[in-house]
Image (spheres, helix red, strand yellow):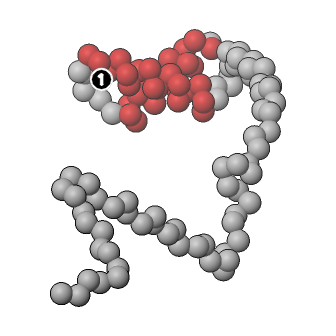
Amino acid sequence: MSKSKHKSKEIKPGKSEKPAKAVKPKKKDSAPESKTSVKAVKEKPKKAVTRKPAAPKKKAAPLGKISQDDIALRAYYIGEERRRTGAPGSSHGDWLEAERQLRAETK
């Protein structure tokens, strides 16, 4: 019987050799990192927002002059009341009623 010069390691049950370390692939230099990475972005301090003062409210239309906006607003409220009560009618009828009411108020 010949004895070998090299001794093999025996693995005991429950014990194993340490696994080899995983090698991470290297990044290719084909695309440079963007300048907007999370670390590179610096937030600028926000300026205080200044708001314009509210526009002055419209005064009532002078005698004899009724604007289309005044009629439209009145027609809107007439239509809302009509729909709330379930009364029949149309937006055109609401417009005509708004004109009639505003003319009666300016006389």
Residue positioned 74% across, 51% down in the render: 40
- Left or right: 34 in relation to 25: right
Residue positioned 33% across, 33% down in the render: 90
Placement of 104 over or under 28, stated as above or below:
above
Residue positioned 57% across, 19% down in the render: 103
- Residue 26 at x, y = what percent? 58, 73
The residue that disc 1 covers is 83
Residue 62 visible here: no
- Residue 75 at x, y = what percent? 46, 26
* Residue 75 vs residue 103, the one in the foreground: 75
Quarter of the image for residue 52 reads top right
- How many badges with numbers are in the image? 1
- Residue 105 at x, y = what percent? 57, 12
* Residue 50 vs residue 88, the one in the foreground: 50
Residue 70 visible here: yes
Screen quadrant of the N terminus: bottom left
- Left or right: 86 in relation to 53: left
- Residue 31 at x, y = what percent? 66, 75
**Which residue extends farthest bottom?**
2
Amino acid type for the residue under numbered disc 1: Arg
